[in-house]
Image (cartoon, rainbow, N blue to C red):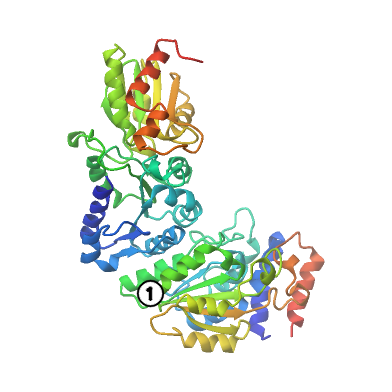
Amino acid sequence: MRKSALNAVHQLAQQDERVVFVGSDLGAGTLEPMREEMPERFFMEGISEQHIIGMAAGLAMEGYIPYVNTIATFLTRRCLEQIAVDLCMHNLPVRLIGNGGGVVYAPLGPTHTATEDIALMRVLPEMTVIAPCDADEIKRLMPQTLEWPGPLYIRLAKGGDEIVSQAEAGSTIGEALLMREPGRVLLLSTGIMTQRALQAAELLAAKGINTGVLHCHTVKPLDIKQLLALLSGIELLVTLEEHTLAGGFGSSVIELLSDSLQPLPPVLRMGLPDRYNGGYGSQNHLLTSAGLDAVDIARQVAQRINGDAPA
Amino acid sequence: MDRRSRDLRRRVVDAIAGERRGHLGPACSLIEIVRTLYDEYLHFRPDEPNWPLRDRAILSKGHGCLALYAILADKGFFPLADLPTFCAPESYLGGHPEAEKIPGVEASTGALGHGLSIGVGMALAARLGGGDHRVVVVTGDGELNEGSVWEAAMSAAKHQLDNLTLLVDYNKLQSYGPVHEVLGLEPLLDKWRAFGFGVAEVNGHSVDDLRRLYASLPLESGRPSAIICHTVKGKGIGYAESAPEWHHKARISDDELAALYQAIEEAP
């Protein structure tokens, strides 16, 4: 997914002279073809994340469209003020590409996992937040980032994630993608939780619980219109995210549904607990520990639907 | 102190007179720095504030904005009559400058340690676009406590941005107390030199010395320039000079206001 996103930056730079790339201290050889072809628009500035946000702001004020790339948590946690003041207050077209959203960096521990990034970014005025589900989808979304107004946070997953998006369905920033028609249950997912949502929906269907999946690659602005249109007959709405439950995707769904003043079904929010991840292992390992593998998602949903969930 | 420096300081007090508040000390240390910039060095068009060929100036120490407002109004970017609306509810002249609201303000500042990075981006953009305009960033001394300043310094040197100049308003006093006690900066000139800048220091209240230095920019070819401007906080207002309580002042009385105007007229 990261390779697809960065290759797309190179392609966009070939099409449009305003595009520049700004990295921190990325892996050796990152975007080497772009560096060779257009060294003047390729900046690798070292482990100075606060600085590269401000530098990107200065470039954007002068008409350039900077794509900034580093590890998701260092972009969002460390640079919150630079992003708020330099990018959002000036409403500049800087694109932040965060590697390893969620618990991709599980083996490296909680300093490196981005489990609050969606919450931090979505509360900033002017900011758009997207979390694609797979490498094909990011390829479809990246061209749209060129002319997107204002700052944009792109949360990337690990890479090699199962491809579940379909070219014919398209992916448009700001529009949620209905990947499975809802029955009694509707799962709302973002990022790679969509893969798990689809698997869980299969398991639930096998138990006679028809379950839909709405993939929200755009967390902000959330496609509340489509969501509201799908609510009739829904007995349980479930939000799924690779993020702590505090302030993330599920929180934004509840906020917007509540603001809509429509009668709402019960909402079950599933995500990471409100603590820094203990233990290492893998992304899968941590997601499973948090009850976010497909089998566990299906089990919890079935319990709720059958009315025998623990209080 | 000549008439022009007195008049610009009077305008700072005019601005304060409206809502009876503001960062007086940090503005008065800046007057000659911004005066010489806008009188002698920068190219700009007040009636076309976004003229592409203009030089870019960023006041990274946003709390010193009263000095910036005084000179921008003086140059005709906005009416002098608007100065007393400073910090009023519907005013566009806030306690820290906002780029979207004020003609002539390039970047919204006030959160410290941001300006030099933005300046690096602008200087890179000038080079990319083939422009020969210049970029100037003015920071405070206390502001140099921020680590992001030094990240930006490394980047400016790496890119050999000799179209970028940093002016440090070194008035030796930050909010809590003397800079050398709160978080000392010395040897400050050596630090900038070590970070790859061409360096100079100057009496930041000497119009002649500032003018001469600006004329020699860049100080070294292929290097960004750093000029340490030795200044006095509250300069020109005797009893407020180097007085921490005049860093930021609210609820200024009629008597205090009259005393401020009088002190400016009597400044040596």
Closer to the camera in the image, A5 or A172? A5
What residue is rendered at 73% in x and 73% in y? B242
Output the chain of dot 1: B
**Residue B127, picture quadrant:** bottom left
**Residue B171, picture quadrant:** bottom right
What residue is rendered at 56% in x and 62% in y? B112
Q: How many labels does the image show?
A: 1
Q: Is residue B60 above or below residue A193?
A: below
**Regarding mark 1 in the picture, which secondary structure is present there?**
loop
Q: Which amino acid does label 1 sit on?
A: Leu
Q: Confirm whether residue B223 shows in the render.
A: yes
Name the residue at the right extreme.
B255
* Relative side of B252 to A221, left or right: right
Q: Confirm whether residue A190 shows in the render.
A: no
**Residue A280, picture quadrant:** top left
How crowded pointer 1 is (Cα within 10 Å; few <14, some 14-19, many 20+) is rated as some
Closer to the camera in the image, B200 or B129? B200
Q: On the image, numbered disc 1 is attached to which residue? A: B53
**Residue A289: percent from the left, percent from the top?**
41, 29
Closer to the camera in the image, A46 or A214? A46
**Residue A184: percent from the left, percent from the top?**
34, 15
**Residue A235: percent from the left, percent from the top?**
39, 15
Q: In this view, does A187 lie above or below A166?
A: above
